[in-house]
Amino acid sequence: MAVSIGHPGSSLRVKAMQTWFSILRDESGTTSVEYSVMLGFILTVVIAAVAAFGSGQNKSWNGIDNQLQSHGF
């Protein structure tokens, strides 16, 4: 990167580039992305488990309802 020393805005550009490169090198945001991905996987598993449990409960209650109806209730 060529910087003209006599130009008044050159130090501002250099500082802006240094700030930009420090942001690119910063890895603190990586952990929040990793936590978001883990949360997505956990929610997917929980939703699948609740759906499977709900389906099983629905079959169970339908069986009880059918037995009660067959006995006249």
Image (spheres, rainbow, N blue to C red):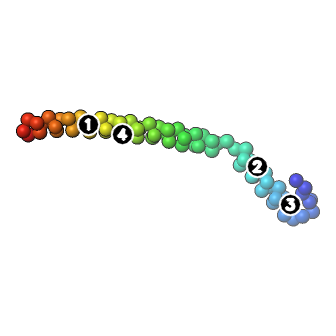
Identify the residue under disc 2. Answer: 21
The x and y percentages for residue 27 are 67, 42
Identify the residue under disc 3. Answer: 10
Mark 3 / mark 4, whichever is N-terminal: 3
Q: Residue 51 carries which label?
A: 4
Residue drawn at 73 percent across, 44 percent down: 25
Q: Distance between the residues labelled 2 and 3?
A: 16 Å
Q: Residue 59 carries which label?
A: 1
The x and y percentages for residue 26 are 69, 44
**Front of the two marks 1 and 3:** 1
Q: Are marks 2 and 1 in contact (CB under 8 Å)?
A: no
- Against 2, residue 25 (above or below) is above
* Residue farthest left in this picture: 72
Within 10 angstroms of label 3, few (less than 14), some, or many (20 or more) residues?
some
* Amino acid type assigned to the residue bearing label 2 in the image: Phe
* Amino acid type assigned to the residue bearing label 3 in the image: Ser
- Relative side of 69 to 42, left or right: left
Q: Is mark 3 on a helix, strand or loop?
A: helix
The x and y percentages for residue 45 are 44, 36
**Front of the two marks 2 and 1:** 1
Q: Distance between the residues labelled 3 and 4?
A: 61 Å
